[in-house]
Image (spheres, grey):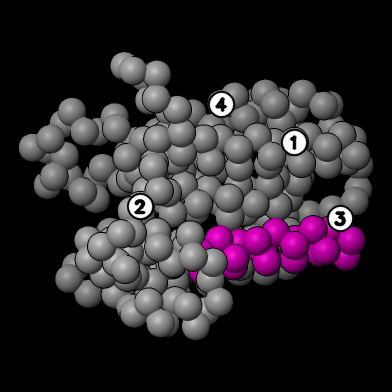
Amino acid sequence: MEESIKPLNPIFLDLGPIQIHWYGVIIGVGALLGLWLAVREGTRRGLHKDTFVDLVLFAIPAAIIGARLYYVIFQWDYYYHNPGDIIKIWNGGLAIHGGLIAAFITGAIYARVKKLSFWKLADIAAPSIILGQAIGRWGNFMNQEAHGDAVTREFLEGLHLPDFIVNQMYINGEYYHPTFLYESIWNFVGFILLILLRRANFRRGELFLTYIIWYSVGRFFIEGMRTDSLMLTDSLRIAQVISIVLILIAVGIMIFRRVKGYSKERYLDVSQ
């Protein structure tokens, strides 16, 4: 049976010299859906409808560059000898932590220039970001990457996964943990959680910080299952270290802002 299994075609559209990959299409869909949600919520929260459109024009290119640079830096031994591969992002190799860091810096600069509250923008964007991450993981699925250790077909079928997922997890003669799926589900649950927490009228900034904590907790455990992790040492995974650091920073900022009285405003307040 395994001999007849063929992976899904990673090419969405082949125009001869130009190929459009599913990886990019799926990430694009996630970004557009996230933007639509942010624009809709931002308008309800008193922001101009173009606020997030303008922000995304800067944030997405910055995020892509940041995600790629982060990945390339930690895989420099390979890219030093293959510099032509640095731009081939359609083959994967976008580290989400690098993208998030670049996007957050861009958002902070944008908020300062536009004289808007960074925390208000971040709170509104948080559900959109994690939804985009949940959708984007399916780009890894099409590329047969971001998977875990080898397992049996019986194990995958025991998870009640549809055949198209089970078959796509058959790579080079073995089946693998669909860790892309685990993270996608974790992020979808996080998206629903953040939408529900909006109604709780959190203090400004804490919805975004909750996103950081939620995502980082899931990423820490799921990263431990992956076989393609970026490593600091033979046993130390970069993403797990970053996840712990982000959790500590998010909790620290939340406590600091409350102690100093910087978080008196609430999510539903309409002030800029």
Q: Earlier in the sequence, mark 3 or mark 1?
A: 1
Q: Earlier in the sequence, mark 1 or mark 2?
A: 2
Please state if 172 lies on the left or on the right of 214 as rendered: left
Q: Earlier in the sequence, mark 1 or mark 4?
A: 1
Residue marked by disc 2 = 7
Q: Quadrant of residue 109?
A: top right
Q: Residue at x 67, y 23 (%)?
A: 54
Foreground residue among 53 and 5? 5
Label ID, residue 266? 3
Q: Nearer the viewer, mark 3 or mark 2?
A: 2
Is 262 above or below relative to 93? below
The verdict on residue 195 being magenta is yes
How many angstroms separate mark 3 from mark 2 (CA)? 48 Å
Q: Residue at x 46, y 33 (%)?
A: 12
Q: Earlier in the sequence, mark 2 or mark 4?
A: 2
Residue marked by disc 4 = 58
Q: Nearer the viewer, mark 1 or mark 2?
A: 2
The amino acid type, in three-letter code, at marker 3 is: Arg
How many angstroms separate mark 3 from mark 4 (CA)? 27 Å
The amino acid type, in three-letter code, at marker 4 is: Phe
